[in-house]
Image (cartoon, grey):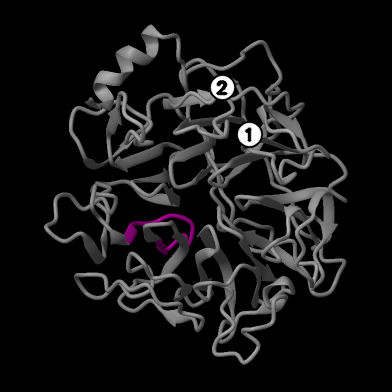
Amino acid sequence: MRLRLSSIFSVAFALGVFASPIACSEDRGGFDDRTADSGVADSPSTSDDDDDAGGNASDAGADVDAAVPDIRVDCQVTPCAVALAARGGAHVCALLSDETVACWGADDKGQLGRGASDDGDDPDRGAHPAKVVGVSGATQISAVGAGTSGTSCARSKDGSVMCWGANTHGQLLPGASTATTDDDPHPTPVRIEGLASAARIEVTGAFACAVERDSTDLAGELECWGDNSVLQLGRGYSPKTHGGIAKVALGFRSVIAVSGTLRNAFAISSDGELLSWGGSTWEIGGSTPVRDALGRESSISPDGTPTPIPGLTNVTSVSASEEHACAVAGGRVYCWGKNPTGAIGNGSRQDVPIPYAVKTGAAQPLRDVAVSNRTTCARAVDGAIYCWGDNADGQLGDGKGASTLYPVWVENVGGRVVQVVAMDRATCALLADGSVTCWGSNDSGQLGLGKRDDDTHYTPRKVVF
């Protein structure tokens, strides 16, 4: 049976499922001030560790002010990483202090950006971080993956965008009106033509979006391209399944950051709201039901109009996997969508149609969130990180191999954490000194140790640049 999200709301509340959204960002760092922060205040007012074990967005987090100055990288190592990018898959990229980009891990679609190379048969080729060819002056990066495929992008200080890797949905070749798709690897970065000067780039598994740079260089209009099968591009109905670059119909809003599942898009507005659009189906029954992560009630399907998710204010971060999304609002993390591995953090594997307030037990308000297709991690303003979901490869960082439906504190990271990013089977943290540590699976070289192996790495290891 297929229901719109307007119908499922009454079902959710009847079952006692109260949810609330969580914001997430995996390509932020101390080098670039263009973050998803919605403001700056003197200090947080309360902690996330209270009596609220989960609730809807109007219930939780409204009294928490997380808009405090973020931790910044103070380079003490060479090379020095200032931001990371990864979301799902098995590869990660680092923005370096010299404005270049280095990537490591799986490279099936050329997502490491190494160009034409004669070492393709080397099994450890991707296990050592190497600089992306032809990219310089970079100020912000984005990366997404599924399995051993993936796509990566970099925004340069002149506002141009370069991307490389998979082009399954036209993320690399948007064209003037229709995106050109293919299944070929693209190991050499290509410039995204026809794009206005960008303040930020975000690539998802099915489409890509760029925040246009305005006079403040902080927020602006949004342009998207790629899959538009359920109106993920936010431009209303179009007979074209894959669309070229065009503006999202934001009305009079401007946005700071964007993310998306395969079928939904999310954007943080300049006033701290979280907008969503795209698929709005929530099927009941069936072996593989379609359950979209729109995060709000809608009477139309699909819903291509960017609309605020009710109750979410002071949103500082948003991140989405293929089928679930999380955001940080008011210092708390909220998640919603499909939940086969417990990545929602609601103490079960039950899917959640609207945002659920995750109880992390954090002593300080949360700042940002990172997701993969199997896990979720959140970072607090004091640098502590908490992860939940699948742990078969030790990717939760608690030193154990047992999956958990509740957040666990990641121990022995090696320093104060500036940023955390999540691949499907491994996790990495950027430390305040500019070094990077990773833990979990290394079967694709995603820990950056210089060698691949089939061991489970339960504790963080330093990436060898």
385 left or right, relative to 424: right
| Direction from residue 322 to residue 113 in the image, left or right | right
Near mark 1 (Cα within 10 A), the count class, few <14, some 14-19 or many ≥20, is many
The region drawn magenta spans: 210-224
Residue 244 in picture, x, y percent from top left: 25, 68
**Amino acid tagged 2:** Ser
Give the SS element for disc 1. Answer: loop
* Residue 350 part of the magenta segment: no
The residue nearer to you, when weighing 132 against 28, is: 132
Q: Which residue lies under the disc numbered 2? A: 348
Mark 1: amino acid: Ala
Helix, strand or loop at disc 2? loop
- Residue 100, image x, y percentages: 64, 78
- The quadrant of the rendering that contains the C terminus is bottom right
Q: CA distance from mark 1 to mark 2?
A: 27 Å
Q: Give above or below for 402 relative to 30.
A: above
Q: Is residue 222 magenta?
A: yes
Expressed as whole percent of the image width and height from the top left, the position of residue 270 reads: 43, 45
The answer to whether the residues at label 1 and label 2 have Cβ atoms under 8 Å apart is: no
User: Is the residue marked by circle 2 packed among few (<14), some (14-19), or many (20+) residues within 10 Å?
Assistant: some
Q: Nearer the viewer, mark 1 or mark 2?
A: 2
Q: Which residue is mark 1?
A: 66
In this rendering, does residue 49 appear at all?
A: yes
**Which residue is painted at 71% across and 66% down in the image?**
445
Q: Is residue 40 visible?
A: no
* Residue 390 in picture, x, y percent from top left: 64, 38
Quadrant hosting residue 435: bottom right
